[in-house]
Amino acid sequence: MRQVAILAGLCVALLALRPSCEAQPAAKDPILVGVMLPLSGSIADFGKSAHQGVLLAAEQINAAGGIKGAQIKLKVIDTRSDPAKVEAAAKKLINEDKVCAAIGDVASGHTLVAARLFKDAKLPLITPCSTNDTLTEGNPWLFRACFADKQQGEACAVFARQRLQKSKIAVLTERDSAYSKALAESFKKRAKELSGEIVAENNYGSGTNDWAPVVEALGDLSKLDLVFAPVYYSDAAMITQELRQQGYTGTILGGDGWDSDQIVKLGGKALDGAYWVGHFNAASDDAKEFVAAFRKKHDAQPDSLAALGYDALMMLKKAFMDAKTTTGKEVADALASLKEFKGATGLMSMDEKRVTKKSVFFFRAKGEAITFDRELKAEDVAKAK
């Protein structure tokens, strides 16, 4: 009898040690999902918004019965806008918390750090908003809820030629930013295919605070009808002010790095009439239910990062539901097979290279307001001539 008792005790102990992601659906243990986002530090605004979206998605999933009867349990770590903290967070989520999958990070360079570790662990990782094209190359475990730089760069070129009817273009980039350079290259290539002319180019270093020579290097501004500046919103605000101060009256266009409520406050009147890319149109039919639920939970208007964080966990929910188990390989395969998935940011599908295909939204500054201008679907960008 004593031997039976010992064996029974050992079985109980082994069951307790078994990772929860391998215990579904019979044990109904919580499904552990890691969340690694910058909740403090220089890009905390992005991380906090994404976190709010993830929290709403988890609440809705659990209220609706969870995943085949199992509740989602989030393991949240603040990566503090620091790549070293990202590495530590990823290791903890994988080795100590034993998560089944994770959401994070925000900046592409930070996501790359985590992606290598999740690849080695053979666990899926979804980034809400890291757009660098190379992130998913050679890594079947990394996915994104957002479009990539190539798609948005090409969309900007199509928007410039077809919507704005501009052809004499200057491109201004931050030379220390892989994001800025990649977006500029995809834009220039597509713009030239569409008979646009890159009249002038210049780049500047991070930490620049004297913008006059940066703009002066573009030459005669009267020869330009468009300046494309794929930079982050704080720099974009300074660039638009300097362009206007030097007499430029043409159109200014930016990528999703401009997508912040802060840009109008920083840019002021100089930003009036400028356009930029966003991931999320709060006024769209796809977003209505999400916006209402977000306002109810957080008493605030959701931004793009909130919507992308929400979509990231909802994508994971769909994969968990479609997979036979919640183990890494099956979930990754289900994520790679997503087609016409309806999220808060619209319809999305994974292509054969696991690149997320979805609409690119364009917005315009009008006075102190930000107004929606146009949606460009992935298929429309691809076939534009």
Image: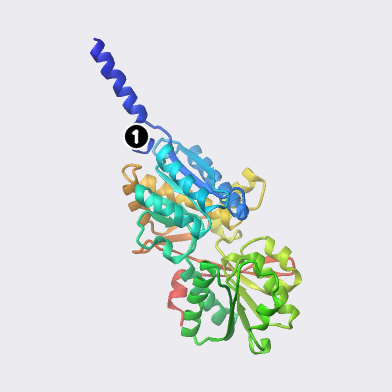
Answer left or right for 343 relative to 263: left
Answer left or right for 75 relative to 24: right
User: In the figure, 182 relative to 165: above or below?
Assistant: above
User: In the figure, 255 relative to 16: above or below?
Assistant: below
Depth check, front residue: 218 or 15: 218
User: In the figure, 333 relative to 260: above or below?
Assistant: above
Depth check, front residue: 155 or 93: 93
User: Which residue type carries mark 1?
Assistant: Ala
Depth check, front residue: 4 or 72: 4
Answer left or right for 106 relative to 223: left
Quadrant of the image occupied by residue 25: top left
Depth check, front residue: 166 or 217: 217
Q: Which residue is drawn at 32% across and 48% down?
A: 329
| Residue 64 shows in the view | no
State the residue position of label 1. Answer: 23
Q: In which quarter of the image is the N terminus?
A: top left
Q: How crowded is mark 1: few (under 14 residues within 10 Å), some or many (20 or more)?
A: some
Q: Which residue is drawn at 44% across and 42% down?
A: 93
